[in-house]
């Protein structure tokens, strides 16, 4: 068995169940992401993709199942050290509206173990803003003064500011124009290739999927219905996946959910 | 409905209420333990001092001055029924310092501070800002809750003290200008009559009410449901709970100070 010699996956989700009241969202989700690879999760709205990401971070407590990060059960050991390995772009941006943009981006660099002098933190923030296509004059504005797409990119800059090993992107290109989506796709790809980070991205945008993914997983009915290399996307023969990637109303996935 | 199912329902209600009290108590305990543990957030604390203390001064001053004035008029009119008009300075002083100062300031803080804390934290919850804080290795209990509760613990007693003084000044103004009291005698009567315990009780009540007001705002904010409706209902519940708890605590503290 070759599998026993290979290093443990960076993230392993094992039979994750999560219900909110009678709404059974995850029903035994299994997923492995190997170190330094880029996993993209696709699936209809409300299928629990965001819930899955939040479960790994411990923001949502699964009802059953186990999650391992780097071979160790998530939630064991020091929580700050655990979280310091992650960067997360939230679906809605989740910027702190009481802080100017640069302090949002530099949040992790201004307190705790990664604390740096203010001018250095600011310089890093401005450099990260530039990487997501924002000029330095947004640094002193407040999140509420920015458009939705700009907020998204500030959130992205915040997620990568401390150069984490594992980065989660929840719909990074939703609400962006096609050119900016291209910039963000390239950036995510770059982060994985250059920084060697492990990335897990949620997206509905098939061009993003092809630009970002090493591996694609499709979440449906609370389980991973299909997982495979991005090259196999078009020849999967899986009716669910085919319907999704071609955006057909007809098929096994009900349009009314 | 059978007696048994009625009993079961009552039991469930009582258990539910007890559980809620338990959750609030646990939250309050957790707030205080987080207050003592680093990291501390001086900027958040300073902003809270400004928000809760300084910016509440106008509303506290207005509340106190009108109440003190009305109190003087009432006592004068009521006292006239048995020739006791002269007690206005004493009753205004004791009424303001022991009861009305702390209670009215407490309720105004519930209206102003509890509601804004609850709405702010609930909005942060709904827009995933709380999740983002946690992800950035920052404990919301330390970053959001502890500075606000500590600021209220420190500033609300001061606000109550200021409210007491302004309330007495309101009574004094009405008594001297409208009711022909002698200014110097009024002040002397006030000062001679008040005892240290009156003032101490007033400030201690302020400290309790401040903690109640800020804690309820934070608690309901952190518990908020989803969406705009969640924020609205968190805000409403926080003000209701703070006001009722402040009045209940006032009753208990009055008992502790003055009838034991
Ligand atoms: N905190 C929560 N409380 C209750 N229900 C939730 C919560 N978070 C998510 N849900 C529900 O779980 C389902 C999946 O949500 P989500 O993971 O956000 O979907 P998506 O796949 O679009 O990211 C939805 O039906 C949503 O209403
Ligand atoms: Mg989502």
Image (tube, coloured by chain):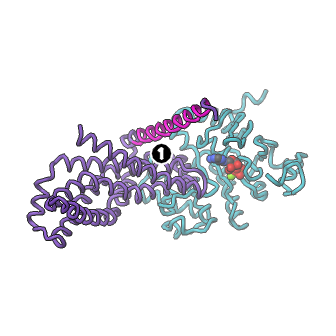
Chain colours: A cyan, B purple
Tell me if I can see residue A227 in this picture.
yes
Residue A63 falls in image quadrant = top right
Residue B61: % across, % down: 29, 64
Left-right relation of B26 to A144: left
Q: Residue at x 60, y 52 (%)?
A: B226
Secondary structure of the magenta portion, mostly? helix
- Going by the picture, which residue comes out furthest to the bottom? B177
Q: Is residue B163 magenta?
A: no
Viewer-side residue, A209 vs B2: B2
Residue B70: % across, % down: 27, 65
Tell me if I can see residue A131 in this picture.
no
Q: Is residue B15 magenta?
A: yes
Read off the magenta span.
B4-31
Q: Residue at x 20, y 69 (%)?
A: B174
What residue would you read off at disc 1?
A: B139
Left-right relation of A155 to B90: right
Residue B185 falls in image quadrant = bottom left
Q: Residue at x 40, y 45 (%)?
A: B39
Image quarter in which the N terminus of chain B is found? top right
Name above or below for residue A75 compared with residue A240.
Answer: above
Viewer-side residue, B181 vs B64: B181
| Chain designation of label 1 | B
Residue B35: % across, % down: 38, 43
């Amino acid at each position: 068995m070759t599998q026993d010699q290979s290093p443990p996956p960076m993230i392993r989700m094992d039979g994750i169940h999560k219900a909110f009241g009678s709404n059974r969202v995850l029903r035994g989700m299994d997923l492995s992401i190997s170190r330094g690879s880029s996993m993209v999760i696709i699936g209809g709205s409300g299928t629990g993709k965001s819930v899955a990401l939040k479960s790994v971070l411990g923001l949502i407590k699964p009802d059953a199942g186990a999650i391992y990060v780097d071979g160790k059960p998530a939630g064991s050991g020091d929580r700050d050290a655990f979280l310091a390995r992650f960067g997360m772009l939230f679906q809605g941006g989740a910027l702190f509206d009481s802080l100017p943009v640069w302090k949002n981006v530099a949040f992790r660099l201004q307190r705790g173990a990664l604390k740096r002098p203010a001018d250095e933190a600011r310089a890093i923030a401005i450099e990260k803003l530039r990487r997501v296509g924002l000029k330095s004059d947004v640094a002193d504005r407040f999140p509420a003064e920015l458009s939705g797409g700009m907020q998204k990119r500030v959130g992205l800059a915040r997620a990568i500011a401390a150069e984490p090993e594992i980065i989660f992107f929840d719909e990074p290109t939703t609400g962006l124009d096609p050119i900016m989506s291209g910039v963000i796709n390239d950036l995510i790809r770059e982060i994985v290739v250059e920084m060697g980070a492990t990335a897990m991205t949620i997206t509905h945008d098939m061009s993003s999927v092809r630009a970002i993914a090493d591996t694609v997983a499709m979440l449906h009915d609370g389980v991973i219905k299909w997982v495979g290399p991005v090259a196999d996307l078009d020849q999967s023969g899986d009716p669910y996946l085919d319907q999704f990637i071609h955006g057909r109303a007809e098929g096994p996935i009900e349009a009314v959910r | 409905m059978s007696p048994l199912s009625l009993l079961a329902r009552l039991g469930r209600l009582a258990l539910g209420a007890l559980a809620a009290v338990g959750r609030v108590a646990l939250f309050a305990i957790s707030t205080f333990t987080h207050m003592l543990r680093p990291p501390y957030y001086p900027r958040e604390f300073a902003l809270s001092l400004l928000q809760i203390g300084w910016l509440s001064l106008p509303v506290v001053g207005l509340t106190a001055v009108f109440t003190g004035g009305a109190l003087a008029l009432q006592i004068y009119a009521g006292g006239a029924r048995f020739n006791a008009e002269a007690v206005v300075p004493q009753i205004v002083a004791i009424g303001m310092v022991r009861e009305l100062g702390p209670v009215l300031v407490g309720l105004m803080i519930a209206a102003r501070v509890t509601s804004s804390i609850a709405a702010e934290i609930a909005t942060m919850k709904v827009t995933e800002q709380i999740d983002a804080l946690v992800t950035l290795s920052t404990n919301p209990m330390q970053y959001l809750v502890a500075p606000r509760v500590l600021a209220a613990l420190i500033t609300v007693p001061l606000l109550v003290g200021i409210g007491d003084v302004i309330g007495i000044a309101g009574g004094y103004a009405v008594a001297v200008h409208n009711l022909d009291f002698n200014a110097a005698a009024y002040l002397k009567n006030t000062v001679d009559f008040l005892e240290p315990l009156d003032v101490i009780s007033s400030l201690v009540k302020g400290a309790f009410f401040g903690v109640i007001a800020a804690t309820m705002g934070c608690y309901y904010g952190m518990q908020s449901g989803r969406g705009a409706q969640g924020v609205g209902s968190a805000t409403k519940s926080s003000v209701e709970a703070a006001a009722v708890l402040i009045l209940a605590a006032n009753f208990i503290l009055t008992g502790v100070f003055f009838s034991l």
